Amino acid sequence: SHGIPRVDDLRILSGIIYVIKHGLQWKDAPREYGPHKTLYNRFIRWSRLGVFNKIFMELVEKQGDTEWLMIDATHLKAHRTAASLPKKGSFPLYRADKRRTELQTSRRL
């Protein structure tokens, strides 16, 4: 749209798969797949549009009759704010030390 030719979708998809498969940061993607910012932007856009879910479902259908289907998502990294969620109280945590202190205090009264 700005006079820059669009990078081929297949080339971008190959780059996205390469980055994820090798655990790279987007900026470390080989140039042959296109600009790293384009790889990242299309990954985000296609994820939001459900493109990868559709691809997965097509692969599942082509697999045929299966009892279990699984995908390994261990390569996914938590967003940097995910580490702070317990601090904000989003996930209630049981703290044994705190509970013991409260119990000891109530017994003394």
Image: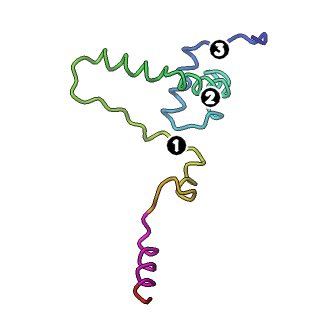
Q: Indicate the amino acid at tag 3.
A: Val
Helix, strand or loop at label 2? It is helix
The tag earlier along the polypeptide, 1 or 3, is 3
Q: Residue at x 60, y 22 (%)?
A: 42
Task: From this view, report whether residue 91 is shown above or below residue 32.
Answer: below
As for residue 97 lying within the magenta part, the answer is yes
According to the image, label 3 marks what residue?
7
Q: Indicate the amino acid at tag 1.
A: Lys
Q: Residue at x 52, y 43 (%)?
A: 77
Q: Position of residue 16 (x, y in %)?
A: 54, 26
Which label belongs to residue 77? Answer: 1
Q: Position of residue 98 (x, y in %)?
A: 46, 74
Question: Quadrant of residue 62 in the image?
Answer: top left
Query: Is the image coloured rainbow, by chain, by secondary structure, or in one colour?
Result: rainbow
According to the image, label 2 marks what residue?
40
The tag earlier along the polypeptide, 3 or 2, is 3
The tag earlier along the polypeptide, 2 or 1, is 2
Helix, strand or loop at label 3? It is loop
Which stretch appears magenta?
A: 94-106
Mark 1 or 3: the one toward you: 1
Q: Indicate the amino acid at tag 2.
A: Tyr
Quadrant including the C terminus: bottom left
Q: Residue at x 45, y 80 (%)?
A: 101
Q: Residue at x 49, y 39 (%)?
A: 76
